[in-house]
């Protein structure tokens, strides 16, 4: 194989687009906060998820993504059962829009596969506050 052909083949492999940094199938990439519709980060369940890099004061306008990165058109408000934080700073999940009501804070590198066991509760997340200041 000629050197120019080899270089062209390597460049072609490097140029293949990759999906956006997102988090289906229980993953949560570095620099993201990931919310999941199912317990245990959707393991063994329908894979509905969404990741965030900034505050969202009202999840009522957001929809879940499916495992293949397509929009499910299913609303997220009051539908989160588990969450992971890989953002690098604390994140607070709030029961009501605009950061009010019961809440639970996840430190960097932590997750909660069963939100029913903490103050915000299961299927009650309506806003999230990322505290990178």
Image (cartoon, grey):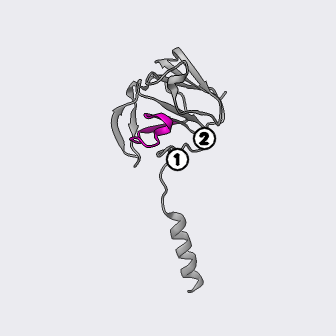
Residue 46 appears left or right of 108? left
Cβ–Cβ under 8 Å for marks 1 and 2: yes
Q: Is residue 4 above or below residue 37?
A: below
Q: Position of residue 18 (x, y in %)?
A: 49, 56
How far is disc 1 from disc 2 in space, using C-alphas? 9 Å
Q: Secondary structure at mark 1?
A: loop
Q: Position of residue 63 (x, y in %)?
A: 38, 33
The residue carrying mark 2 is 31
Q: Where 88 falls versus 97 (above or below)?
A: below
Q: Residue furthest left?
A: 73
x and y, in percent, of residue 116 in the image: 50, 24
Residue in view at x 53 percent, y 27 percent = 55
* Residue in the foreground of this view, choosing between 46 and 22: 46
User: Across the whole image, how many numbered discs are drawn on residues?
Assistant: 2
Which residue appears at 41% of the width and 23% of the height?
A: 78
Q: What range is drawn magenta here?
A: 35-52
Q: Quadrant of the N terminus?
A: bottom right
Q: Is residue 130 magenta?
A: no
Q: Which residue is mark 1?
A: 21
Q: Residue at x 54, y 81 (%)?
A: 5
The quadrant of the rendering that contains the C terminus is top right
Picture quarter containing residue 65? top left
Q: Residues within 10 Å of mark 2 (few under 14, many from 20)?
A: some
- Is 45 magenta? The answer is yes
């Amino acid at each position: 194989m000629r050197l120019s052909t080899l270089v062209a083949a390597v460049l072609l492999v490097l140029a293949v687009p990759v999906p956006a940094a997102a988090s289906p199938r229980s993953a949560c990439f570095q620099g993201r906060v990931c919310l999941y519709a199912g317990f245990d980060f959707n393991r063994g369940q329908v894979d509905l998820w969404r990741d965030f890099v900034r505050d969202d004061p009202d999840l009522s306008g957001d929809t879940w993504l499916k495992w293949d990165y397509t929009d499910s058109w299913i609303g997220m408000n009051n539908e989160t059962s588990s969450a992971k934080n890989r953002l690098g700073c604390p994140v607070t999940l709030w029961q009501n829009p605009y950061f009010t009501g019961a809440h639970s804070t996840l430190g960097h590198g932590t997750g909660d596969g069963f939100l029913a066991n903490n103050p915000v509760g299961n299927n009650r997340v309506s806003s999230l506050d990322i505290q990178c200041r």
